[in-house]
Image (tube, helix red, strand yellow):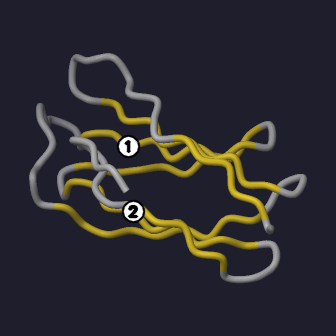
């Protein structure tokens, strides 16, 4: 899938009838937080403190998430230094 400055390759893998594994790459000078609210998942990607631009070296991460009301509504939010938040990519995954 497409890559961004703060998000490299990302994939979705069904691991059970109700669960998916989300694999993604972020720069090695960034961190992320997975949030779940109102039936939606958000992965926020931030630069580490003191950093001004994302590294070109990426680390792989993964998270397992469960269906909520029959789907996974997932958005990646990228927070570059002194720039507007990038609110993509977005995906809706279902069991079918």
Q: Position of residue 12 (x, y in %)?
A: 54, 67
Q: Is residue 36 left or right of residue 33?
A: right
The residue depicted at 32 percent of the width and 60 percent of the height is: 9
In the rendered image, the vertical position of residue 34 relative to residue 81, given as above or below: below
Q: Position of residue 41 (x, y in %)?
A: 65, 47
Q: In what element is the residue under mark 1?
A: strand
The residue depicted at 45 percent of the width and 35 percent of the height is: 88
- Residue farthest to the right? 69
To which quarter of the image does residue 45 belong? top left
Task: Measure the alpha-carbon separation of dots 1 and 2.
Answer: 11 Å
Q: Is residue 58 left or right of residue 90?
A: left
Q: Is residue 75 left or right of residue 16?
A: left
Q: In what element is the residue under mark 2?
A: strand
The residue depicted at 90 percent of the width and 52 percent of the height is: 69
Q: Position of residue 19 (x, y in %)?
A: 73, 73
Name which of mark 1 and mark 2 comes first in the sequence: 2
Q: In the rendered structure, find residue 24 and report the number of the disc placed on it.
A: 2
Q: In the rendered structure, find residue 45 and report the number of the disc placed on it.
A: 1
Q: Residues within 10 Å of mark 2 (few under 14, many from 20)?
A: some
In the rendered image, the vertical position of residue 14 relative to residue 53, given as above or below: below
- Tell which tag, 1 or 2, sits nearer the viewer: 2
């Amino acid at each position: 899938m497409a890559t961004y400055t703060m998000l490299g390759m990302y994939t979705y893998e069904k691991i059970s009838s109700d669960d998916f594994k989300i694999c993604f790459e972020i720069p090695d000078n960034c961190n992320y937080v997975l949030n779940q609210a109102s039936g939606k998942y958000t992965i926020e990607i931030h630069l580490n403190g003191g950093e001004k631009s994302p590294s070109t070296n990426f680390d792989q991460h993964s998270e397992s998430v469960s269906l909520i009301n029959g789907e996974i509504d997932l958005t990646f939010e990228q927070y570059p230094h002194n720039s507007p938040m990038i609110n993509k990519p977005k995906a809706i995954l279902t069991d079918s």
